[in-house]
Image (spheres, rainbow, N blue to C red):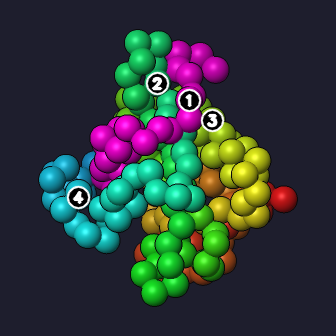
Amino acid sequence: MSGYRIRPAAGDDARVLADMLVEAVNWNALRARPRVTVLEDPFVARYIAGWMRPGDFGCVAEDHHGTPVGACWARLFPANAPGSGFVAVGVPELTLGVNPQWRAQGVGRALLREIARRGAASGVARLSLSVERANFAQRLYVSEGYVTVASDDRADVMVRALR
């Protein structure tokens, strides 16, 4: 790794995860929404609300000054309130956000690998996610072993087996 390090996400990282959630939602700069609008959307905000709940885990990438540049975290959702990438009870859904200046430099891939390592070490069998088809990150997910298990008119739900 060059220029950044990855550390475990902690309970006091809610602000960092909020920043990276906004980056994830605003992956397309032409459709970017203001931070407050993103975080006031209850469907989006639940990906970080009450961080760190039992079952939550994640990691944060920081530059050599300790400034967060990306994060990847996983959260369980119940069947009666599923996330966009919900596949089954007990399968954590991940979110990946990287600061635009750090994209295409290996940060997202390193975070995906670390979240998979952490998930496998804690006994998680699969991880899921939802990605819009136009998002360039979809190629990253495929290259890291995620496969499409469901689709709608704009997005795919993808899963990676960890064991």
Identity of the amino acid at label 3?
Answer: Ala
Q: Residue furthest right?
A: 163
The answer to which of marks 4 and 2 sits earlier in the sequence is 4
Report the residue at 59% width, 64% height from top.
92
Q: CA distance from mark 2 to mark 3?
A: 12 Å
User: Within the magenta stretch, is there residue 15?
Assistant: yes
Q: Which residues are magenta?
A: 1-27
- Position above or below: 99 against 155: above
Q: CA distance from mark 1 to mark 3?
A: 11 Å
Residue 118 picture location, percent across and down: 68, 45
Q: In the picture provided, is 75 more to the left or to the right than 89? A: left
The residue that label 1 is drawn on is: 7
The answer to which of marks 4 and 3 sits earlier in the sequence is 4
Which of the two discs, 4 and 1, sits closer to the camera? Answer: 1
Label pair 1/2, CB-CB below 8 angstroms: yes
The answer to which of marks 2 and 3 sits earlier in the sequence is 2
- Position above or below: 9 against 116: above
The residue that label 2 is drawn on is: 62
